[in-house]
Image (spheres, rainbow, N blue to C red):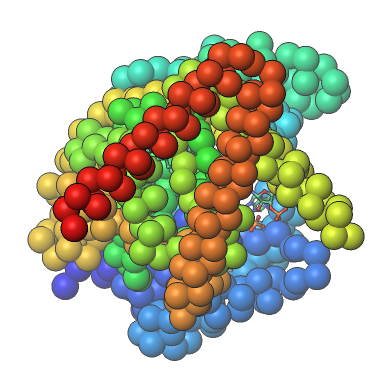
Amino acid sequence: MSMIAAFYGGKAILITGATGFMGKVLMEKLFRTSPDLKVVYILVRPKQGQTLQQRVFQILDSKLFEKVKEVCPNVHEKIRAISADLNQNDFAISKEDMKELLSHTNIIFHCAATVRFDDHLRHAVQLNVTATQQLLLMASQMPKLEAFIHISTAFSNCNLKHIDEVVYPCPVEPKKIIDSMEWLDDAIIDEITPKLIGDWPNTYTYTKALGEVVVQQEGGNLNIAIIRPSIMGATWQEPFPGWVDNLNGPSGLIIAAGKGFLRSIRATPMAVADLIPADTVVNLTLAVGWYTAVHRPKSTLVYHCTSGNLNPCNWGKMGLQVLATFEKIPFERAFRRPNADFTTNNITTHYWNAVSHRAPAIIYDFYLRLTGRKPRMTKLMNRLLRTLSMLEYFVNRSWEWSTYNTEMLMSELSPEDQRVFNFDVRQLNWLEYIENYVLGVKKYLLKEDMAGIPEAKQHLKRLRNIHYLFNTALFLIAWRLLIARSQVARNVWFFIVSFCYKFLSYFRASSTLNV
Ligand SMILES: CCCCCCCCCCCCCCCCCCCCCCCCCCCC(=O)SCCNC(=O)CCNC(=O)[C@H](O)C(C)(C)COP(=O)(O)OP(=O)(O)OC[C@H]1O[C@@H](n2cnc3c(N)ncnc32)[C@H](O)[C@@H]1OP(=O)(O)O
Ligand SMILES: NC(=O)C1=CN([C@@H]2O[C@H](COP(=O)(O)OP(=O)(O)OC[C@H]3O[C@@H](n4cnc5c(N)ncnc54)[C@H](OP(=O)(O)O)[C@@H]3O)[C@@H](O)[C@H]2O)C=CC1
């Protein structure tokens, strides 16, 4: 019997960010392994055109929850969606709901965050720092609370090269940042943002670092742990391989490459691609929840959920495997044949962006205009280039994350828990994982049917022929223009033609002799 699964039985669990990528995988695993848990409270913000219940049903109706519905048929009764907006005071939770949360909650998993790299500092601070502070305050009023698990990111200290499992101080105290956001106007915040974030690459990683400091400073007597996942990718094994439902991290780029839009990316092939499957993160998170509640460590422990130091894979290997998978499992209606490459300096990056990204987009938009349709490719391409420029920081550097706490926790688990809540990335076969990831992107993100693969392959063959035809025509036109203008080119041309003629004459003469 799994001790961790048994621990969550009968518990009231509060999850923020349950409608997000990690939150869904976390809920799924909780219900599948501890169907006898008491209730899962989820803080959900109302979305235009969707009630809270509709949002919950949409999640439960997805393929991700198929197994859960078998082991926990009354799962919908155990999820209690609470209307909440983490941007508001007291999260805009009603008095009755707040009372219920405060009096019942046993464990908190704080996953909600803004993960946008380019978010305005005010918004990023509000969600990633102030909301964390407010949640801690709520937690301190929960008499039955056993553990508070805060999800951060391994990149919260990406301004360092070697990162230990400790909370690092920030140059400006989070409290001062929170205060200043209250009275500074947007224009001034825009102006001081680069100075404030200093050597952090974006507001996301900076505010996640501030969030950790808040957790450490304001955790009081709570049993707290911080988990730092690296780049969360599709599921590895559970509930099935390849599940993914948003475009963050590599997923968006896999689509862009598979559809033929992405032709080159500025990346260092040998840099470590620190991907971590979402189910691995969730297994560690649940194990940490158990350990923190049962063993009550004296200080706040930080757990790195990374792959680089235990089972490293680099971007070169990952990119090649992604491309190899497109050969077997192509995406439908590709714009061009998937064929991307890495560039390593500014000049080649600009060159390939112009030749392989912007030029085809302009040509295609021209064609759309000619055929009376609305041009859209240039806009899409500009968006892709903007995304690439934001991700570049992470694919041209390597970091070392120590994993002492994570390894310690692994050794604390019973063999059964090590199996059921497996977070040992040494067992991960990257090539297999990446193939399943690409397949998952096709099935769950693009919603493409596997039956369409032969047609997709045919389409790619047509694109290849068009590509050859286009290149040949381009070469002939260029050559013709060159010959018209340059004596040297003419001489080369006559030399080639006479050489070919002589070769053919010789070949014909020798074949006649043989007869
Ligand atoms: C020697 C060998 C050579 C071999 C060569 C082989 C080369 C092969 C290459 C092939 C394949 C490539 C695969 C591997 C490459 C991997 C690169 C991976 C990079 C990973 C970097 C991760 C960084 C990790 C940091 C920390 C991790 C975390 O803690 S948090 C999670 C990370 N957060 C994110 O990823 C969020 C990023 N997104 C944003 O910040 C914003 O969305 C944006 C700034 C990118 C865009 O903002 P914008 O306002 O313009 O748009 P938005 O409103 O958000 O969306 C508009 C439309 O664009 C779609 N969208 C959104 N995000 C993405 C995305 N990441 N990629 C693509 N498209 C995206 C969105 O859905 C919208 O679409 P519509 O609804 O249709 O309008
Ligand atoms: N994805 C990754 O690669 C990594 C993620 N992380 C961390 O893991 C955690 C989960 O990330 P992930 O699941 O990918 O993120 P998602 O963007 O998929 O999910 C974010 C969640 O936060 C919720 N949320 C955002 N704003 C509010 C608000 N104002 N009020 C209430 N809820 C809100 C979202 O709700 P809604 O559905 O309404 O938008 C959603 O449920 C985050 O803390 C992130 O920093 C760490 C490392 C890597």
Does residue 101 appear left or right of residue 45 in this picture? left
Q: Is residue 164 above or below residue 241?
A: above
* Residue 490 screen position, x and y as percent: 58, 21
The residue under the point 49% across, 63% down is 461
Q: Is residue 466 above or below residue 332?
A: above
The residue under the point 51% across, 74% down is 455
* Residue 232 screen position, x and y as percent: 42, 48
Does residue 117 appear left or right of residue 309 in this picture? right
* Residue 344 screen position, x and y as percent: 44, 22
Q: Nearer the viewer, residue 361 or 255?
A: 361
The residue under the point 80% across, 64% down is 48
Q: Nearer the viewer, residue 481 or 243?
A: 481
Q: Inspect this view and state whether residue 447 appears.
A: yes
Q: Residue furthest right?
A: 372
Q: Is residue 229 above or below residue 195?
A: below
The residue under the point 29% across, 39% down is 506
* Residue 241 screen position, x and y as percent: 34, 66
Q: Inspect this view and state whether residue 384 appears.
A: no
Res 166 → quadrant: top left
Quarter of the picture holding the N terminus: bottom left
Does residue 440 appear left or right of residue 127 in this picture? left
Q: Nearer the viewer, residue 163 or 43?
A: 163
Q: How many discs appear?
A: 0
Q: Is residue 107 above or below residue 59?
A: above
Q: Nearer the viewer, residue 339 or 269?
A: 339
Quarter of the picture holding the C terminus: bottom left
